[in-house]
Amino acid sequence: MTRRLVAHLNADAPAWTLPAAGVERLRGAAPSGWEAVILDAPTRSEGDGGAPATEAAVAAIADADAYAGFGMSRALFSVAHRLRWLHTAAAGVGALLFPEMMASDVTITNSAGVHAIPIAEHVLGGVLLLLRGLDLARDLQRAARWDREPFVGAHSVVRELGECRALILGAGGIGSAIAERFAALGAHCTGVRRHPERGVPNGCDRVVGPNAWDALLGGIDVLIVSAPATTETQALVSAAALDRLPSHAIVVNVARGTLVDEGALAEQVRRGRLRGAVLDVFAHEPLSASSPLWGLSSVVITPHVSGVSPRRYWQRELDLLIDNWHRFARGEPLRNVVDKTLGY
């Protein structure tokens, strides 16, 4: 009997929709005895629970052995009786960890690392903007003012990345890619990971555990949050942690908005207690028009798009998915297996 992989890789946006060439590549890569069924209806966002239980999706998933998509709803999972492997094209898996999934023997793999390069470049660009004072230059340009004081005066905001110390909370694939780029420009990076005994991540000078990073905040120039969202990382960067940062420090969040106290961060930037922030994720998305963050010129806000790379994302995503598909067909260990109890 032919085994089936159902792929529902359409998140209702061109950048997240499997292109025609990718459809053909996936179909042509099927292991012996397998077929790929490609669904083309738009799926909902990860926060809404992934692919809905449409009539076509239910018909396809009912006897599928494997599924690839942007998450999966509880309703769709309830009819996937033969499912043994679920791959999500996102890195976060929080919406997938509902009780029925947790109790099942379905293996979940995610796309951690697939987004690492564009996110690292996004972080680098945002931090350099603030270090060079380009946020101030933008405001001066809009006001048609020629003013060198913020750049050459006694209180110049300008700094080189090479003189900075960065603390990276979450030194996995994304954190390591960020560290590599920062280190290439001379910055000194300290990585924070759950198991520091596994070694120093690429780009980092050293690594510390989850109980040691707080003591380092007073000597940090850039605090980067790239850890997974779990119960342990909820409100990881608290108001008290922000208080310990130097006044010239920059805060970056490309993880999940729930990891950082947004209100405290906005207030500290507003008061000039912190240099600024680079934020791609927020506790509630879309970010409310009433959020004080919008009015802060030294906060770089992007709408959860740091991982976007339209030309290269699908190449990396399909490399991972197809490799895992063949591993699954051969009964071999899969890459990027999620620990359901840890949430990543």
Image (cartoon, grey):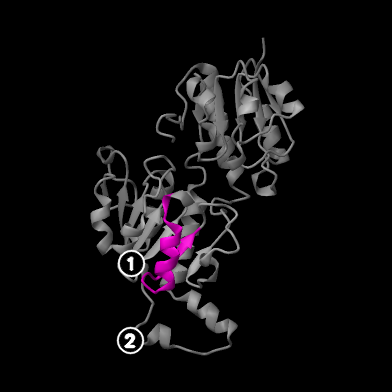
Helix, strand or loop under label 2:
loop
Q: Quadrant of the C terminus?
A: top left
Helix, strand or loop under label 1:
helix
Could you tell me how many numbered marks the image carries? 2
What number is the disc on residue 154?
2
Which residue is at 36% across, 67% downward? 161
Does residue 327 lie above or below 272 as drawn? Answer: above
- Under mark 2, the amino acid is Ala
Which residue is at 57% across, 30% downward? 322
Looking at the image, is mark 1 or mark 2 earlier in the sequence? 2
Does residue 272 lie above or below 123 as drawn? Answer: below
Question: Residue 127 at x, y = what percent?
Answer: 44, 65
What number is the disc on residue 214?
none
Does residue 178 lie above or below 296 as drawn? Answer: above
Q: Horizontally, is 140 left or right of 225 in the view?
A: right
Question: Residue 284 at x, y = what percent?
Answer: 55, 52
Instruction: Confirm whether residue 51 shows in the render.
Output: yes
Question: Residue 32 at x, y = what percent?
Answer: 62, 17
- Under mark 1, the amino acid is Gly
Q: Quadrant of residue 224?
A: bottom left
What number is the disc on residue 162?
1
Q: Horizontally, is 120 left or right of 17 in the view?
A: left
Does residue 250 lie above or below 87 as drawn? Answer: below
Q: Residue furthest bottom?
A: 146
Judged by depth in the image, the label closer to the viewer, 1 or 2, is 2
Start-end of magenta stretch: 259-279
